[in-house]
Image (cartoon, rainbow, N blue to C red):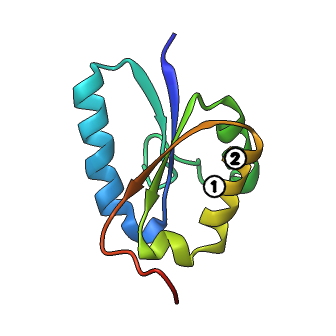
Amino acid sequence: MKAQVFLSHSHQDSELVQALEQFIESGTGGAVELFNTSSRTQGIKPGADWVRAIDRSLETADVVLAVISDNYRDSEFCLVELGAAWALAKRTIPLICPPVRQSK
């Protein structure tokens, strides 16, 4: 069974996340299934209830990779995803993308 990986990120960082997605896929030989809301193939289908789709993907995730950037930190929804991962006791790996401001 493939490991389920949830890529938590700001849509403003979608280019960076797409590169990360390619890196993970090439390095794992298909051993993981990624959920990336910015992906046309692995993201949320048009017309779908996107909040519910994210909830379901977080619930089934084995690992949450949080791509922490200024955009992430400034997004209330990203912080809610991170809080949900914590509340669900998901293994969460923060990937810090400098520079990240310490305050607004």
Q: Residue at x 46, y 80 (%)?
A: 102
Total tally of numbered discs in the picture: 2
Dot 1, how many residues are within 10 Å of its Cα: few (below 14), some (14-19), or many (20+)? many
> What is the CA distance from the residue labelled 2 to the residue labelled 1?
6 Å
Q: Position of residue 16 (x, y in %)?
A: 30, 59
Residues at circles 2 and 1 in contact by the CB criterion of under 8 Å: yes
**Location of residue 79 with respect to 54 vertically, above or below:** below
Q: Secondary structure at mark 1?
A: helix
Q: Residues within 10 Å of mark 2 (few under 14, many from 20)?
A: few
Q: Residue at x 64, y 65 (%)?
A: 79
**Can you give x and y, in whole percent of width and height, for residue 83 in the image?**
70, 55
Residue 44 percent location from the top left of the image: 58, 48
**Residue on which disc 2 sits:** 86
Q: Quadrant of residue 13?
A: bottom left
Q: Residue at x 33, y 20 (%)?
A: 30
**Disc 2 secondary structure class:** helix
Q: Residue furthest bottom?
A: 104
Left or right: 34 in relation to 47: left
**What mark, if any, has residue 55 been given in the picture?**
none
Residue 34: x %, y % from top left: 46, 35
Q: Which is more toward the observer, 47 or 38?
A: 38
Q: From the viewer's perspective, is residue 6 above or below residue 102?
A: above
Amino acid of disc 1: Leu
Residue 30 vs residue 65, the one in the foreground = 65
Q: Quadrant of residue 22?
A: top left
Give the residue type that dot 2 points to.
Answer: Trp
Residue picked out by circle 1:
82
